[in-house]
Each structure stands twice: as structure tokens, then as C-alpha cells.
């Protein structure tokens, strides 16, 4: 059966690790817009089109580069164009348009929308369209954000819509120019709401995942576009244990799109991911699919079926096995074989791509579990001359500790004999090394203590000798003073000679 199923991109436990991801999906931009144009920002928040996307920034959910990168390395390679498969705890998990819609709530229904005709209102965006002017997020932040105070109110609202689309929903680099199609759509908000943003943003995210595949082994990191927060939230929903590590749900009775109900610092290390995979219990919760289920069977809605999707019998076999509730814990996935010539070619191509991307700049750097660059801790701070709101996730450490304590107390029956022997040997060798280091440390400290005590005793002996000498000298000086005292008293008590007055002769 192993030969009939897809292979993993990397072998289990052999996933590469990187220091950072330069992501183009930026929530800081929303914070800046809210600060500079609060009335217009609130107006856009009232619209159900993107309000559940914008609330991610208000809830304070951070980005975990390590979690996202780790899952990119766990991809199961298939021929599907419009879905990705990943594995965790040896269980296959699907990331398709169905899951993306469940997470984002964005429209995925394709319909004909005429955007050729638009009404010229003589405003700023009308001028941009007529003159074929180029504008991007970088220019908006550096120039037009301040100049917008002389625009019409509706043009400022349109700018916020465009920033949400380019900066978050599509997750494009800040130097990529706005497509004129997007500008024309904002001229008619009804057309903007009917546009299938979920469909196109999902397709662009899949292309970004494919593009990043050649860069996963670059230790210093790589650039990635697309709505990465949606991918992260899918991981947190598909594997609730990661949800507990990375954050918490805002409300237990939440019924909207999943992306609007998460908050947290998303501090998840590579070791946390590895440990969770090893300790994951047999009855641990994993969701291979999302949203559409009926009587335990997968329901493929027509809204998510793509006419030009490729057939892959390996995926069909996985679907059948999942429906039969197969236990994947003892399954060993094959690994994609890559020749050295292919690896060298991929490295050269990815280096050229990365050079081009780095020259564009404008992306947010995510260092591992540190979510937003310099904002490593939660609390109040000032960034780039403006106050930045930070959301405190006080329960992050306790949630993680409780989760791993519970997993450690759970019998792990799915660990095979070889793995058990490996773990036992690892623990024993670790204890032996720890014992040697502890013994050496104790010996070193005792030697240092002995040296300190010896030096201190020598110092005390010298001080005592000096004190005795001082006392003897004081005693001798006292005796000398006593001997000199009687002679002085005798001289003082001798009888005094008085003169006898004589009579004068007359």
C-alpha cells in the first residue's frame, strides 16, 4: 500500500529548519490605517466582506514562521492543482479550497462580473485608472496616506479596501503595483463584494507554497507571499494541540469564519513540533478535512469542485482509507527521491529568485516564534514613531506546559519497538552524560570551595597575628605610662619654700 500512496517531500524527522520567513502578508498595515483614518477604517469594518479578516489584527494573533515552515516540509506530493496534502503524526491532512473557505469565509463562487464599465467621479482613483498610473503599498505608506486628507471620503474608504486586498488577502509584496482591475472593482462596492476573492487568493497561496519549495533548505530564510495567516490558522484548527500551543479561541460559541476567533503569541519552537509529533496519542484529535461532513463521510460540495482539476488515484485511495477510519499511526510514508543534479539546479534557481525578491524589499521579517520583528514581547511599545498595541498572552506558557504534561501521561501505544528502544537509549545516554557533567561540576565547585576556604583561613590567621601584635604593643605602652606616673607625683608634692618678710630699718 505504501507504494500506492503519495511520498513525503522530506523524510520523517529530516525536515530542514530555517531562522526566519520574510512574509508579505502584513497586519501592521491595518494598524497604521486604523490610526491614520479611524472613521473610514470603522466604515470598512462594518462591511462583512473583509471584517472577519481585519479582526485578526485586532485580536492580536501573531505569526509562527516555524510552524508554517515545518508544515511546508511535511507536504505529500500529489498531482493535484487546487489542493495540498500534508502529514502530521503520520496522518494525511488536506488543505483545499474547502478548508480555505472554512478558515477565511471569503467568496469562492466564480461568476461573471463586468468591470469594464465604471463611473468616473473625478476623484483620486478615477484619475489613477484613466492615466494608467502605478501605485503600490509602499507609495501609499510613504506618500498618499498623508495626502489622502484632501481626498473625498469615499476615495479614502476605497484605499482601505485596496490595502486590505493587496496587503492581507492576497499578501503581495509592497512594491507590487495594484492591478487596475482591483481599482475598478472599488469604484462599485457591489461588484467588489461579488468578486471571488477566496478563489483567487487561495490559488495565489498555492503558487507561493510551490515557489517556496525550492527554498526550504536555506538556513537564513526566504521570502513568501500569500495569505499565510489563513494557512497557519488551518494548522491550528486541523490539529487542536497546535491551537493550544499557539493561542486560544476568543469565544467558545463562535460561529463565523475560523480566522476571526483566534488570539495568541504563537510561540511554537521546532522542538515543540517534534515533541508533539512523537507524543501524539492514539486518540489525539486530527481533522483531515474541514467544514463539510455528513454521517462521518466526506461531502464534496459543488462550490469547491474545479473543472480543470487533475485526477490522482493516490489521492482517491487516501480519501477511501480516511473514510474507512484507518489507523495511520504505524504507516511509513515514502520520500521523494531527488538527484543531486536536480538539487543543484533548484538551488541556483532559488538563489536567483531570492536575489530578485530581496531587491524588491518591503516584507515583514518573522524570526521563528517571534511574531513581528522587534515586537518580541507583549506589552506597550513605540514602533516607528507611533504607538503599537500589543496583546498580552499570559496563558501561553501554562497552556503549553499542561499540554505536554497531559501527553506525557498518556500511554503511547503507537510507538513501535525500534522507536521505543531508540527513545530508551536516548534517555539513558542523556542521563549518563548529565551525570558526568553534574559530577564534574560538583568536583570543580568543591575544589573552588576548598581554595576559597584555604585562602580565607590564611587571611584570618594573618589578621589574628596582626591583632595580637597590636594588643602587645598597647599593653607595653600602658605599663610605661604607669611607671612614669609616680615620679611626676613626687615632684608635685615636695614642700614649697616660702620667703619670710623682713622689717625695714628706719
Image (cartoon, helix red, strand yellow):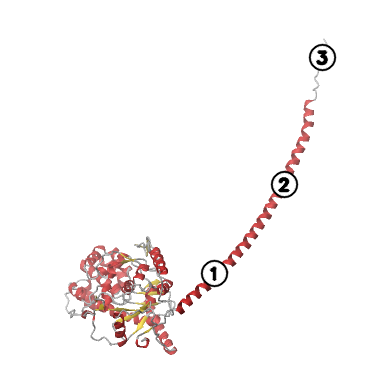
Q: Categorize mark 1 by other alpha carbons within 10 Å: few (<14), some (14-19), many (20+).
A: few
Q: Could you say which disc has been placed on residue 276 in the image?
A: none
Residue at horizontal 78%, vertical 31%?
486
Q: Nearer the viewer, residue 360 or 59?
A: 59
Q: Categorize mark 2 by other alpha carbons within 10 Å: few (<14), some (14-19), many (20+).
A: few
Q: Categorize mark 3 by other alpha carbons within 10 Å: few (<14), some (14-19), many (20+).
A: few
Is residue 179 at all visible to an observer of this figure? Answer: no
Marks 3 and 2, the one that precedes in the sequence: 2
What whole-number distance in Å separates the C-alpha atoms at marks 3 and 1?
Answer: 113 Å
Marks 3 and 1, the one that precedes in the sequence: 1
- Residue 351 picture location, percent across and down: 41, 83
- Residue 333 picture location, percent across and down: 39, 83
Tell me the quadrant of the picture where the N terminus can be found. bottom left
Marks 1 and 2, the one that precedes in the sequence: 1
Q: Is residue 438 left or right of residue 327?
A: right
Is residue 222 at all visible to an observer of this figure? Answer: yes
Give the secondary structure at mark 1.
Answer: helix
Give the secondary structure at mark 2.
Answer: helix
Q: Single out the residue that lies furthest toward the top.
A: 506
- Tell me if label 3 and label 2 are in contact, CB under 8 Å: no
What whole-number distance in Å separates the C-alpha atoms at marks 1 and 2?
Answer: 50 Å
Report the residue marked by disc 2: 468
Q: Could you say which disc has been placed on residue 434 in the image?
A: 1
Residue at horizontal 48%, vertical 77%?
421
Q: Could you say which disc has been placed on residue 502 in the image?
A: 3
Amino acid at each position: 500500500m505504501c507504494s500506492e500512496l503519495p511520498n513525503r517531500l522530506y523524510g520523517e524527522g529530516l525536515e530542514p529548519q530555517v531562522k526566519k520567513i520574510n512574509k508579505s502578508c502584513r497586519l501592521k498595515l491595518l494598524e497604521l490605517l486604523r490610526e491614520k483614518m479611524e472613521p473610514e477604517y470603522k466604515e470598512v469594518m462594518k462591511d462583512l466582506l473583509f471584517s472577519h479578516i481585519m479582526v485578526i489584527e485586532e485580536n492580536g494573533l501573531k505569526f509562527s514562521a516555524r510552524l508554517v515552515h515545518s508544515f511546508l516540509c511535511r507536504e505529500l506530493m500529489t498531482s493535484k492543482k487546487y489542493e495540498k496534502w500534508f502529514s502530521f503524526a503520520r496522518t494525511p491532512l488536506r488543505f483545499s479550497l474547502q478548508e480555505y473557505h472554512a478558515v477565511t469565509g471569503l467568496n469562492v463562487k466564480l461568476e461573471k462580473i463586468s468591470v469594464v464599465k465604471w463611473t468616473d467621479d473625478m476623484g483620486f482613483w478615477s484619475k489613477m485608472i484613466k492615466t494608467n498610473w502605478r501605485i503600490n503599498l509602499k507609495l501609499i505608506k510613504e506618500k498618499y496616506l498623508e495626502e489622502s486628507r484632501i481626498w473625498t471620503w469615499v476615495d479614502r474608504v476605497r484605499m482601505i479596501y485596496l490595502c486590505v486586498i493587496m496587503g492581507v488577502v492576497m499578501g503581495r509584496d509592497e512594491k507590487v503595483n495594484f492591478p487596475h482591475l482591483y481599482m475598478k472593482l472599488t469604484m462599485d462596492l457591489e461588484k467588489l463584494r461579488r468578486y471571488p476573492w477566496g478563489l483567487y487568493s487561495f490559488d495565489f497561496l498555492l503558487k507561493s507554497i510551490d515557489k517556496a519549495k525550492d527554498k526550504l533548505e536555506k538556513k537564513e530564510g526566504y521570502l513568501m507571499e500569500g495569505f499565510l495567516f489563513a494557512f497557519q490558522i488551518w494548522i491550528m484548527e486541523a490539529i487542536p494541540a497546535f491551537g493550544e500551543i499557539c493561542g486560544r479561541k476568543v469565544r467558545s460559541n463562535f460561529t463565523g469564519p475560523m480566522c476571526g476567533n483566534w488570539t495568541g503569541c504563537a510561540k511554537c519552537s521546532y522542538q515543540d513540533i517534534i515533541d508533539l509529533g512523537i507524543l501524539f496519542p492514539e486518540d489525539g484529535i486530527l481533522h483531515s478535512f474541514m467544514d463539510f461532513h455528513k454521517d462521518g463521510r466526506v461531502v464534496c460540495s459543488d462550490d469547491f469542485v474545479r473543472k480543470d482539476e487533475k485526477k490522482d488515484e493516490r489521492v482517491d485511495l487516501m480519501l477511501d482509507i480516511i473514510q474507512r477510519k484507518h489507523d495511520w499511526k504505524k504507516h511509513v510514508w515514502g520520500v521523494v527521491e531527488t538527484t543531486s543534479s536536480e538539487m543543484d539546479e533548484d538551488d541556483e534557481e532559488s538563489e536567483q529568485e531570492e536575489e530578485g525578491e530581496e531587491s524588491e524589499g518591503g516584507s515583514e521579517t518573522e524570526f521563528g516564534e517571534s511574531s513581528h520583528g522587534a515586537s518580541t514581547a507583549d506589552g506597550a511599545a513605540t514602533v516607528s514613531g507611533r504607538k503599537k498595541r500589543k496583546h498580552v498572552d499570559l496563558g501561553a506558557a501554562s497552556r503549553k506546559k499542561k499540554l505536554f504534561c497531559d501527553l506525557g501521561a498518556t500511554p503511547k501505544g503507537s510507538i513501535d519497538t525500534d522507536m521505543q528502544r531508540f527513545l530508551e537509549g536516548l534517555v539513558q545516554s542523556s542521563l549518563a552524560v548529565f551525570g558526568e557533567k553534574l559530577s564534574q561540576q560538583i568536583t570543580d565547585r568543591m575544589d573552588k570551595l576548598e581554595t576559597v576556604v584555604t585562602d580565607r583561613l590564611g587571611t584570618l590567621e594573618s589578621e589574628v597575628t596582626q591583632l595580637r601584635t597590636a594588643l602587645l604593643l598597647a599593653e607595653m605602652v600602658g605599663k610605661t605610662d604607669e611607671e612614669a606616673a609616680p615620679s611626676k607625683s613626687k615632684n608635685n608634692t615636695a614642700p614649697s619654700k616660702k620667703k619670710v618678710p623682713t622689717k625695714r630699718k628706719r
